[in-house]
Amino acid sequence: MAKRAKVVKEKSIEDRIWDSANKLRGNLTASEYQNVVLGLVFLKYIGDCFEKRYNELVEEGEGFEEDRDEYTAEHVFWVPQNARWHNIASKAEDAMNIVLKQCEQWAENQDVA
């Protein structure tokens, strides 16, 4: 009797993202994790709204792009410079680059026999 070859089904991108999210979640409960994720989603949303209004003010050319009242008058959250999404994302990228560099250095220093 011939043996059948085991068919390995490749995971969909959704399944891989879900698995990665579960790994990142670690020991957090789902309710604790939702607070982290929803906070980031909210921050991204208000950042996008802020950036849209910011670009509109730049196009107007009157120099009011850092005037808090120009945002609140349009029901847009004012986002301080250091809390803007591009700053947060660049800091996260910088941190990841540091961690990856440390991992590379560690791997280079390992004695492979």
Image: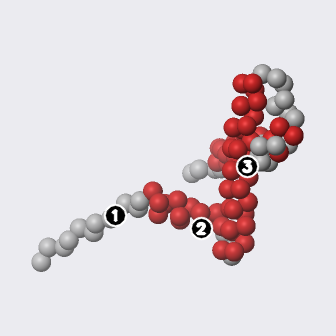
Residue 94 picture location, percent across and down: 74, 41
Q: Residue furthest left?
A: 1
Question: Circle 3 — which element?
Answer: helix
Amino acid type for the residue under numbered disc 2: Asn
Q: Earlier in the sequence, mark 1 or mark 3?
A: 1
Pointer 3 residue? 46
Name the residue nearer the viewer: 78 or 107: 78
Toward which corner of the image does residue 98 lie, by quadrant?
top right
Q: Report the disc number at residue 99.
A: none
What distance separates the C-alpha of mark 2 from that of mark 3? Answer: 26 Å
Whether residue 79 can be seen here: no
In the image, taking residue 81 as reference, residue 89 lies left or right, namely: left
Toward which corner of the image does residue 48 lie, by quadrant?
top right
Mark in front: 1 vs 3: 3
Q: Earlier in the sequence, mark 2 or mark 3?
A: 2
Q: Residues within 10 Å of mark 3 (few under 14, many from 20)?
A: some
What distance separates the C-alpha of mark 2 from that of mark 1? Answer: 20 Å
Q: Residues within 10 Å of mark 2 (few under 14, many from 20)?
A: some
Q: Report the disc number at residue 9.
A: 1
Q: Residues within 10 Å of mark 1 (few under 14, many from 20)?
A: few
